[in-house]
Image (spheres, rainbow, N blue to C red):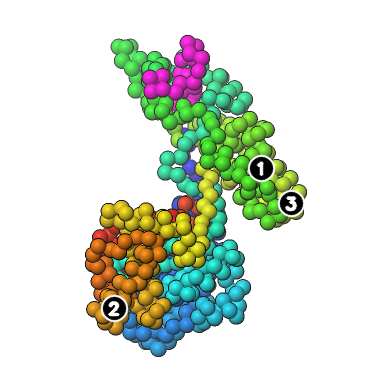
């Protein structure tokens, strides 16, 4: 059996506090989170729920921009306000209570309107990792979204009205190295073994191994020998189900039998049979990685090219030369039933080969950096890049300001999704119409009188539908409901959407896991949700 992990030294208080999340994104992910600075515009119930869920895991710093004064409605929906907060600045009061959740987080409050900041100090937003906006007016959304797009700062626009909640992520380009796929493919290179692996596999003669050691042969060795035996009569790599079943039959032949001719149950041979379908996949260069390394961003590098594209360019050079059409070896060995000596030896073979190939890529990265005279890229970053090169992912987003202008692509996308039965796109139209209503009447629909605002909101909905060449809603039920909400926030809905937004912000800050691209809508009445990409 593989040796157990050595007992870790006594954990620090910080490690104990963040133990669960460190298992998700590691020390380097936590370090990235602690360097992040998040800006929240408007400390609404939704806004404070978002901050709660990023302050608890240890975000580096938060800044709340809010010029509003705490009202009775705020106190009724926002858990981070007290009765004594009434009449005080909402951002300052919310910040005071939120920071009690985690003293390690730094906090700042700015008592200004975002439009005022954009006019007087547009560079204010450049220092933030992500800007989050809640309860914003349509004019402010357009101005802020365009500004953040121009300075390349990610923006998350969030809404919570009655039972409806949504968020929209605006990000120009987001590269993810650690995507954490649910079913990560093993990279054993049995079809094209490198010299050290080939030498080790050939050194073990399964049929000559003593009975006491027979149950401790690594299944990789067993599988390799079964394939070699199969290839004596077949000049190809086993691909079909029939061929793989033949490999399993050969493995059965390797199993020792007792004096009564009954096969001895050995776990390593059972592991080898289970691995046939997943580990006999031929080594190949995924199409999505080909698209990345041969894209214009990786080929036409500039001084301001991101480290991701520089590493993609170096990866391309490695694949074309030393890699001979293959990605760098992952160097990760799955757990298996084996003697400690054989497992460690095999593990070191894979690790050493992976380290050698990552070193080649690193040298190529250094050459590119030297030619471009740009900022250096660490060896640790290159090793991480090579380790996850099979699952690299890039998101290229769209501008919220362009979406609000309803260009032809947006119009056709909305129209297409409105044709579907029970479609969530209806709620997108309602939320947009509510913004339009607020711009025209300086209040939310239904805030003063529910019945009287129905016709006015219906006019806003009809205008939106007309702009996208869609027929009016057959029923006014959704419009009645939006007016009945009166612009109020329901805390349970805000808490759910807030947690979802916090997840996405953490993904962006740590550059791990794939964030939503780009719109998420939640209907608390039906508990349905949907994602859209405008």
Asked whether the residues under the numbered discs 2 and 3 touch, taking CB atoms below 8 Å apart as contact, a structural biologist would say no
Assign a secondary structure to mark 3. Answer: helix
Asked whether the residues under the numbered discs 1 and 2 touch, taking CB atoms below 8 Å apart as contact, a structural biologist would say no
Query: Which residues lie in the magenta part?
Result: 219-244
Q: For the N terminus, give its image quadrant.
A: top left
Whichever of callouts 1 and 3 sits on the residue coming sooner in the sequence is 1
Left or right: residue 366 versus residue 9 is right
Whichever of callouts 1 and 2 sits on the residue coming sooner in the sequence is 1
Left or right: residue 15 versus residue 45 is right
Q: Nearer the viewer, mark 1 or mark 2?
A: 2
Q: Nearer the viewer, mark 2 or mark 3?
A: 2
Q: Nearer the viewer, residue 308 or 161?
A: 161
Q: Residue at x 30, y 56 (%)?
A: 423
Q: Nearer the viewer, residue 192 or 288?
A: 288
Circle 2 residues within 10 Å: few <14, some 14–19, many ≥20: many
Which numbered marker is on residue 372?
3
Secondary structure, magenta segment, majority class:
helix
Assign a secondary structure to mark 2. Answer: helix
- The residue where tag 2 is placed is 453
Q: Residue at x 51, y 77 (%)?
A: 114
Q: Nearer the viewer, residue 475 or 20?
A: 475
Percent position (x, y) of residue 288?
52, 41
């Amino acid at each position: 059996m593989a040796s157990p992990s050595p007992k870790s030294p006594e954990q620090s208080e910080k490690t104990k506090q963040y133990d669960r999340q460190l298992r998700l994104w590691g020390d380097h992910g936590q370090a990235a989170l602690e360097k992040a600075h998040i800006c929240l515009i408007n400390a609404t119930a939704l806004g404070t729920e978002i901050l709660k869920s990023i302050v608890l895991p240890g975000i580096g710093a938060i800044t709340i921009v809010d010029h509003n004064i705490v009202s009775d409605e705020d106190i009724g929906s926002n858990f981070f306000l007290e009765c004594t907060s009434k009449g005080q600045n909402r951002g300052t009061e919310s910040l005071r209570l939120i920071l009690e959740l985690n003293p390690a987080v730094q906090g700042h409050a700015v008592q200004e309107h975002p439009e005022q900041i954009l006019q007087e100090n547009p560079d204010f937003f450049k220092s933030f990792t992500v800007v989050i906006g809640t309860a914003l007016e349509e004019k402010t959304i357009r101005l802020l979204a365009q500004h953040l797009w121009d300075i390349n700062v990610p923006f998350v626009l969030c809404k919570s009205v009655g039972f409806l909640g949504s968020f929209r992520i605006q990000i120009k380009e987001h590269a993810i190295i650690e995507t954490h796929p649910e079913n990560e493919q093993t990279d054993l290179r049995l079809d094209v073994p490198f010299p050290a692996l080939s030498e080790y596999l050939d050194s073990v003669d399964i049929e000559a191994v003593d009975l006491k050691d027979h149950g401790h042969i690594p299944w990789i060795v067993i599988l390799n020998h079964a394939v070699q035996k199969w290839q004596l009569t077949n000049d190809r790599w086993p691909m079909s189900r029939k061929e793989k079943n033949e490999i399993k039959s050969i493995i059965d032949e390797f199993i020792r039998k007792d004096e009564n001719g009954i096969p001895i149950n050995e776990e390593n041979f059972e592991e080898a049979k289970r691995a046939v379908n997943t580990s006999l996949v031929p080594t190949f260069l995924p199409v999505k990685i080909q698209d990345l390394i041969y894209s214009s961003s990786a080929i036409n590098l500039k001084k301001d090219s991101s480290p991701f594209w520089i590493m993609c360019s170096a990866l391309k050079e490695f694949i074309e030369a030393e890699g001979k059409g293959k990605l760098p070896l992952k160097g990760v060995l799955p757990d298996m039933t084996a003697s400690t000596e054989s497992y460690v030896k095999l593990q070191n073979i894979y690790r050493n080969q992976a380290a050698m190939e990552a070193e080649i890529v690193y040298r190529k990265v250094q050459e590119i950096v030297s030619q471009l005279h740009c900022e250096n890229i660490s060896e640790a970053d290159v090793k991480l890049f090579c380790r996850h090169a099979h699952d690299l992912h890039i998101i290229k987003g769209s501008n919220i300001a362009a979406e609000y202008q309803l260009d032809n692509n947006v119009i056709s996308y909305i129209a297409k999704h409105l044709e579907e039965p029970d479609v969530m796109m209806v709620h997108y139209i309602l939320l947009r119409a509510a913004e339009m209503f607020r711009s025209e009447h300086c209040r939310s629909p239904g805030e003063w009188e529910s019945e009287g605002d129905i016709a006015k909101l219906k006019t806003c909905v009809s205008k939106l539908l007309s702009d996208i060449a869609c027929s009016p809603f057959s029923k006014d039920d959704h419009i009645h409901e939006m007016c009945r909400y009166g612009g109020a926030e329901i805390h349970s809905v805000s808490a759910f959407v807030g947690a979802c937004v916090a997840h996405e912000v953490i993904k962006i800050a740590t550059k791990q896991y794939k964030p939503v691209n780009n719109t998420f809508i939640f209907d608390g009445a039906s508990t349905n949700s949907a994602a859209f990409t405008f």
